[in-house]
Image (cartoon, rainbow, N blue to C red):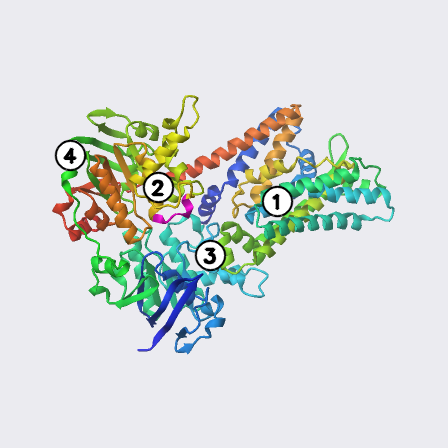
């Protein structure tokens, strides 16, 4: 009885279908290329998608509150560039400062977004498109578009840290990267905030019905401030991860990724209207995009085609949700006709 | 008997307008009281003063449970501390959260709590629901429930604090008969526990069934307090409007012999079954029934939005197929939706643009641009035909009163010169005086030879404005009668009991 109810409840969640799609795709991909379904490849995907995964968590929180943030890539770029500049030019930097500085910058820029949205009472999409241009424009002007590289040795060695040490058949060692661990820690913390703090519940409430939230005495400004600063913080963290992975910092490397991240979160079932979405869904959304991209790369499909595939997958999954909603609406309007 | 609430000398001025003028009002412990009045009569202002949202003018006296209030420092928090809760029409709940969290939501807001105690939230919700003996699935997401159940959730939420007075704004306007009954059962249970309930309404409806006293407001003044047994529909209308509105069955001489529309064996699975009726030129036909009887579904089928599976539609003796609203328009059928604010009008646009939006193709000049002169004439005709009162045709529709907005919607459809006009709840949310003038307009349209179908759940509206009435129940047509052959009580019986 218990398990049956549990399965029924599971099947009612949209996320489960995403999981089915991912499993189906993985089976297909591993038939075509046996390298796909190996632990080594899985660890590799988890490592290279920790950047996008962390940003997606931030975007989810913003969407839940009923807002949206387009500027987080510019935010991350600024944070990353300042860190990289200090790394290259000041020998006194260490790992703590390298983490702290981008985080502080991210939070500060997020705070600017929240303040503008609240005090101008303007749509978040307009404000964050504007701040995206301002943050990025200023950076380009100041940096002159110069690339930064030649980081200290410890910075180059840090991303190689891993747990679970294994060796593949060719004798090359691999493991679960520290970058993936950071991603997992962020997901767990965010889960705790959303589920077990009153702040988290207030974020959901505000996204569900802002007017009722105000009437219940919630401090809208405080919640918005948290949400956009949290997004900024995660943009800062993600920017470090990206720098660690790439080992070069260009002022335009992260730009243009914002829609891909938002798409992954929406694919994971989060509503652009606010109030609904889950971390599990977001992780699955990111996984789906990762699976497709990685699988197509293993199949040597051109990266242009990869974009087409991702676009199509999003359209298909959104249509499924829309059709489901239509079916529900039809059931609701039906009349109990006397036969 | 001691009063729970006593109010004296209550006035309120808004930039010179007297919203409330020296009103006195009182509530007994545990009574069920109904406050009625038209839009703008001061009902909402009175509620806002009771709930501490706005202060009354100097000189007002308010006592709750015998304790006089310091009215200049009375806030909504004080009001809640005194056990007063208001459930607004929009309910102020969170559609994305579960029932349990909605009921216990205020626990999150209480000071000093940083972490959520889910078992506490659970227990609070479970106890309240058990306490008033209703059946609610606590795990359900609120947004997936009916309005009636959401309302019960709102009541449960109010019960979490110390509830002494529950004020409900228009609670029955979107409920079916059964749902209203179960709401009343809950209210009676609250009464047993000594909780006072106050309903606020501008509709002359079921609320009168349960109310023990009725206070009528008009133009910011208290007309009086009445025993509902002494109030008839006519008397209450008179008290609310101050005007004697004549209720007579409409003139049948305008109905011609020529049959405009014939519907035969109209069926749609899960919507309605075997519907047969006809509509003559100049006739006003009312279709009534409870919420969920299939009346709206039938209207939408005739307009092609919700096409029928089987059946025949004959217009002017010619069999036609209506599969989309385009088909309906081509055959001279117009449809005015119930939700005129969302579906019928472009609110920020001007009256002129709204009236002509259905006929833009007729206003083109030789180079296919809109001809300003043609448009001006069309707008003027619409405004004059329907006696829309506006400062200018360029005024935005959202600045008009409900009655005038409804006229703009009508004008927009009249511009298409329809042969048949379907009106879904044409006077919902409009006050009594504006209502009767809309009804007058509808009769004039019929006299011009248009066949009109009114969908309405107000028996009174159907009976005194239609020539003929069809009653639907569970998707079937159960009665087709001339309104002059039927009394209000009979029609009420057929609709509600069967």
Helix, strand or loop for disc 1: helix
| Residue B240 falls left or right of residue A233 | left
Badge 4: residue crowd in 10 Å (few <14, some 14–19, many ≥20): some
x 57%, y 47%: residue: A122
**Residue bearing mark 1:** A127
Mark 2 or 3: in front is 2
Mark 4 or 3: in front is 4
User: Magenta segment range?
Assistant: B397-402
Q: CA distance from mark 2 to mark 1?
A: 37 Å
User: Does the segment drawn in magenta span residue B478?
Assistant: no
Helix, strand or loop for disc 3: helix
Q: CA distance from mark 2 to mark 3?
A: 40 Å
Badge 1: residue crowd in 10 Å (few <14, some 14–19, many ≥20): many
Q: Which of pointers 4 and 3 lies earlier in the amino acid sequence?
A: 3
Q: Chain of mark 2?
A: B
Q: Main secondary structure of the magenta part?
A: helix
x 81%, y 37%: residue: A148
Q: Estimate the x, y position of residue A197 in percent, counting from the top left.
A: 58, 57
**Residue bearing mark 2:** B408
Q: CA distance from mark 2 to mark 4?
A: 27 Å
Residue B102 numbered tag: 3
Mark 4 on the same chain as mark 3? yes
Residue B426, by quadrant, is top left
Q: CA distance from mark 4 to mark 1?
A: 62 Å
Q: CA distance from mark 1 to mark 3?
A: 32 Å
């Amino acid at each position: 009885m218990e398990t049956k109810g549990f399965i029924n409840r599971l099947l009612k969640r949209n996320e489960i279908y995403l999981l089915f799609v991912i499993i189906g795709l993985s089976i297909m991909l591993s038939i075509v290329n046996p390298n796909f379904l190996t632990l080594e490849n899985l660890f590799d995907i988890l490592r290279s998608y920790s950047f996008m995964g962390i940003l997606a968590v931030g975007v989810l929180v913003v969407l839940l509150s009923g807002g949206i943030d387009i500027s987080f890539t510019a935010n991350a770029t600024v944070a990353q560039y300042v860190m990289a500049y200090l790394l290259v030019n000041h020998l006194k930097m260490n790992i703590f400062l390298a983490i702290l500085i981008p985080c502080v910058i991210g939070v500060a820029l997020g705070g600017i977004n929240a303040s503008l949205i609240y005090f101008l009472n303007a749509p978040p999409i307009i404000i964050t498109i504007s701040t995206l241009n301002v943050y990025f424009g200023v950076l380009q002007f100041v940096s002159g578009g110069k690339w930064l590289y030649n980081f200290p040795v410890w910075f180059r060695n840090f991303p190689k840290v891993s747990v679970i040490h294994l060796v593949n058949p060719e004798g090359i060692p691999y493991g679960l990267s520290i970058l993936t661990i950071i991603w997992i820690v962020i997901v767990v913390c965010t889960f705790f905030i959303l589920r077990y703090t009153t702040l988290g519940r207030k974020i959901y409430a505000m996204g569900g019905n802002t007017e009722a939230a105000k009437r219940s005495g919630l401090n809208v400004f405080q919640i918005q401030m948290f949400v956009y600063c949290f997004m900024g913080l995660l943009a800062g963290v993600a920017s470090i991860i990206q720098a660690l992975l790439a080992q070069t910092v260009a002022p335009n490397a992260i730009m243009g990724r914002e829609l891909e991240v938002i798409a992954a979160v929406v694919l994971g079932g989060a509503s652009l209207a606010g109030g609904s979405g889950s971390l599990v869904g977001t992780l699955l959304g990111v996984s789906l995009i990762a699976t497709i991209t990685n699988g197509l790369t293993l199949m040597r499909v051109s990266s242009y085609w990869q974009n087409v595939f991702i676009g199509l997958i999003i359209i298909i999954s959104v249509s499924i949700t829309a059709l489901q909603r239509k079916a529900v609406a039809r059931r609701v309007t039906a009349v109990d006709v006397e036969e | 008997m001691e009063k729970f609430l006593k109010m004296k000398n209550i006035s309120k001025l808004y930039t010179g307008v007297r919203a409330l003028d020296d009103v006195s009002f009182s509530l007994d412990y545990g009574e069920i009281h109904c406050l009625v009045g038209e839009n703008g009569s001061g009902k909402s202002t009175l509620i806002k003063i009771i709930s501490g949202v706005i202060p009354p003018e100097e000189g007002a006296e308010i006592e709750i449970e015998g304790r006089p209030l310091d009215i200049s420092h009375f806030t909504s928090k004080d009001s809640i501390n005194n056990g007063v809760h208001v459930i607004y029409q929009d309910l102020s709940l969170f559609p994305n959260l579960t029932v349990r969290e909605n009921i216990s939501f205020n626990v999150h807001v209480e000071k000093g709590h940083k972490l959520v105690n889910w078992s506490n939230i659970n227990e609070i919700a479970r106890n309240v629901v058990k306490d008033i003996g209703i059946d609610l699935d606590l795990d359900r997401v609120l947004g997936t429930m009916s309005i009636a159940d959401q309302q019960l959730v709102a009541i449960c939420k109010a019960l979490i604090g110390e509830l002494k007075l529950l004020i409900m704004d228009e609670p029955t306007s979107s409920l079916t008969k059964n749902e209203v009954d179960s709401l009343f059962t809950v209210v009676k249970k609250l009464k047993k526990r000594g909780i006072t309930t106050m309903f606020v309404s501008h509709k002359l409806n079921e609320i009168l069934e349960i109310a023990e006293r009725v206070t009528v407001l008009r133009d910011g003044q208290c007309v009086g307090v009445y025993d509902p047994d002494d109030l008839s529909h006519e008397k209450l209308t008179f008290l609310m409007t101050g005007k004697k509105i004549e209720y007579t069955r409409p003139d049948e001489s305008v109905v011609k012999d020529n049959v405009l529309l014939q519907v035969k064996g109209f069926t749609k699975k899960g919507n309605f079954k075997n519907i047969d009726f006809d509509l003559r030129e100049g006739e006003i036909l009312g279709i009534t029934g409870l919420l969920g009887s299939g009346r709206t579904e039938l209207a939408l089928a005739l307009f092609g939005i919700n096409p029928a599976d089987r059946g025949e539609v004959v217009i002017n003796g010619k069999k036609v197929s209506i599969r989309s609203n385009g088909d309906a328009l081509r055959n001279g059928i117009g449809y005015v939706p119930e939700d005129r604010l969302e579906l019928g009008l472009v609110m920020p646009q001007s009256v002129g643009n709204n009236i002509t939006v259905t006929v833009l193709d007729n206003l083109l000049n030789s180079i296919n641009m809109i001809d300003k002169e043609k448009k001006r004439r069309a707008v003027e005709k619409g405004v004059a035909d329907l006696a829309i009162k506006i400062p200018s045709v360029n005024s935005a529709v959202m600045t008009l009163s409900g009655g005038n907005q409804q006229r703009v919607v009508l004008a927009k459809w009249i511009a298409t010169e329809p042969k048949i006009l379907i009106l879904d709840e044409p006077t919902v949310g409009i006050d009594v005086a504006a209502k009767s003038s809309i009804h007058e307009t509808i009769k004039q349209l019929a006299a011009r030879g248009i066949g009109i179908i009114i969908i309405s759940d107000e028996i009174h509206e159907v009976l005194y404005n239609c020539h003929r009435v069809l009653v639907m129940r569970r998707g079937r047509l159960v009665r087709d009668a001339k309104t002059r052959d039927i009394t209000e009580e009979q029609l009420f019986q057929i609709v509600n009991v069967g």
